[in-house]
Image (cartoon, rainbow, N blue to C red):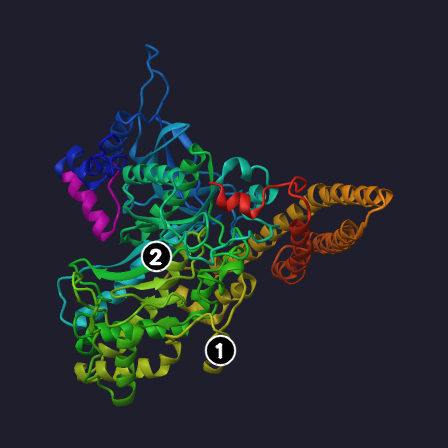
Amino acid sequence: MSEFLDVEDLFASKVFTLGKMKERLPKGTYKEVKKVMEEGGELTPATADVVARAMKDWAVENGATHYTHWFQPLTGITAEKHDAFVTNPDEEGRMIMEFSGKELIKGEPDASSFPSGGLRATFEARGYTTWDITSPAFIKETATGPTLCIPTAFCSYTGEALDKKTPLLRSMEALSRQAIRLVRLFGNTEAKKVTPSVGAEQEYFLIDAKKALQREDILFAGRTLFGAPAPKGQEMDDHYFGVIRERVGAFMHDVNIELWKLGVTSKTQHNEAAPAQHEVAPIYESANVAVDHNQLVMETLKRVAGKHGLRCMLHEKPFAGVNGSGKHNNWSITTDNGINLLEPGQTPNENIQFLLVLACIMKAVDTHADLLRQSASNVGNDQRLGGYEAPPAIISIFLGEQLEDVVSQLVVTGKADSLKEGGVLHTGVSTLPDFVKDATDRNRTSPFAFTGNKFEFRSVGSSDSIGSPNTTLNAIVAEAFCEAADRLEQAEDFEMAVHDLIKEYMTEHQRIIFNGNGYAKEWVEEAARRGLPNIPSMVESVETLTTPKAIRLFEKFGIFTEAELRSRAEILYETYAKSVNIEALTMIDMANKQIIPAVMRYANVLAETVIKVKEAGANAAVPAKLLDTVTAKLAETKDALEALENAESVASSMKQGKEQAFFYHDKVVTAMNALRKPADELEKLVDKNYWPFPTYADLMFEV
């Protein structure tokens, strides 16, 4: 019998929640902390000291000896430097454990080795971490022991943002300010803040760790660079939502326990479409906490996998020919008095506030489709977007039949008098109830889909931080809200003005709505006819950050300066080049040291077989033909290998920046694909006993 698990008692047991603060802080101190969390501002030094002592005492009671400012630099992952609570021993030689308000609020990690895109010179090391009071501190239990982790922002000595959190917090404040202006126009005088809420579904692959260690590409690149398809893939659709295997189930159980301790509301778990692919999903929470929690989800998946002899792969396309992994970013906006601005209600055609919000989001996504596409760009996503379960690289909005019909009515006549109903689903079974259907089905091929009371941004890559997509979403919607509020606040007749504005925005931006099959070739042609941007790769998306339109947007709301945007563009180009360089060098190493020698050994066996069969006076046509095929493919592989070596040599000698990144994209990636083709064909021909590393069948079906 399994041991009883008290989830209610376990949940957030390793988090310094508001509840724990209320228990441990003086009443006045707690009120000051809560006010700063809700309204902004700074804690007084005296209050910070009190909070720090209480936080330290709680952490020590939970076994912690160290604390760290936990931050998210532009590497896309988290960073931490651990400091012990210890101070100099007293006169009697006793160690005293202390933690001050100053240590809580500010840290000073070395900034020189983190990506800065030219914002910091190598010799300028100082950077500051600053406590994000809106995201709770937590204790992370690893092999180093329990460590108090304090979520922080990370900025340079001169104030530029060097992380994902700072721009996100700026964008949340910008969105809140502009959204409040709109809700005030509709008579909501109680709301003081509007918060974007996010729920990030996380897809991942699990493979056996011992097999992973036998493949250089998985170790160095996080994905397979070679690999012929297994005889069976996902074509039977039997893995999707299938029975979870025992080993995987044990892993998921432990993941849930670790996440619940950290206050992460891990709710849903299931098998995904591809063999060895799975998903975990939380409940919605404020955007900045959701970003922090998603980083914890990724860290926890990897750490717990190791304890089970597994390797968690978060790459967007770890295996060719099957479903890639994404991260569905479910986004909504809610007032602090409980009004979801994306809730259409029973009669969305009559819900003027909802229709205005919808019209503004249509305007935002259409105006800045290029920026939204860029926010979901990374090296791995280049292999994923547009294939299998992933949405296309073309940004569009799915509204469903009901809302699309409402929009059409408003565009044509300026009013929506009718509403499509969902109807009743008749099961045809007497013991099963008939029930009312939703008015709209879902569209899994849409990159930005309305799903009831939220938008699901499905393009985000599985390994990426959700900080950038949500920063961009908040920013573009804040701009649309601002422009709408500017006009409506000046209107003499508000009701007439808001109806006119809704019709205007929906008419001008209806091209962004597409409810059809995003995978179809016809959509590419139709999108081009509509004038929608089609940005197929990461390197082609980078320049969208530094257009005059983007700079105006981000500077207007204080989210990024032009210098910060240009630095991020530089970092993205460098990241792309470095990532592809690692992949190319790994392919070269595997081909030179593993694949070609293995094929030569097999060819030698075939040659000896041909000779022996002929000496025996028998027909050697079969082994001779196989030998010819193998040696021809081997020659093709060698030629492709030399072409890749030449391309990589040229690329690595180029100056870092845009030109080098595009050379890697146009020349090196092409050469990599050319090498993979004959190598994968050889895998199908060579005796399995000679093949130098585990195959797709070994990796995906033996967990």
Q: Residue at x 42, y 69 (%)?
A: 552
The residue wearing badge 1 is: 522
Badge 1 marks a residue whose secondary structure is helix
Mark number, residue 52: none
Q: Residues within 10 Å of mark 1 (few under 14, many from 20)?
A: few
For the residues marked 1 and 2, what is the alpha-carbon distance in whole angstroms? 40 Å
Amino acid under disc 2: Arg
Between 239 and 320, the one lying in front of the other is 239
Between 420 and 92, the one lying in front of the other is 420
Where residue 658 appears, x then y in whole percent? 61, 61
Q: Residue at x 40, y 41 (%)?
A: 301
Residue 561 shows in this picture: yes
Single out the residue that lies furthest toward the top: 92
Q: Is residue 188 left or right of residue 636?
A: left
Amino acid under disc 1: Glu
Where residue 51 appears, x then y in whole percent? 24, 35
Residue 559 shows in this picture: no
The chief SS type of the magenta part is: helix
The image quarter containing residue 665 is bottom right
The residue wearing badge 2 is: 170
Q: Pick whichever of labels 1 and 2 is earlier in the sequence.
A: 2
Where residue 425 appears, x then y in whole percent? 21, 69
Task: Write the start and end of the magenta stretch as one range.
Answer: 28-45
Between 255 and 335, the one lying in front of the other is 255
Where residue 212 appears, x then y in whole percent? 54, 40
Quadrant the N terminus occupies: top left
Label 1 or label 2, whichever lies nearer to me, is: 1
Is disc 1 in contact with disc 2, using a CB cutoff of under 8 Å?
no
Between 386 and 531, the one lying in front of the other is 386
Q: Is residue 545 magenta?
A: no
The image quarter containing residue 296 is top left
Q: Is residue 683 left or right of residue 624?
A: left
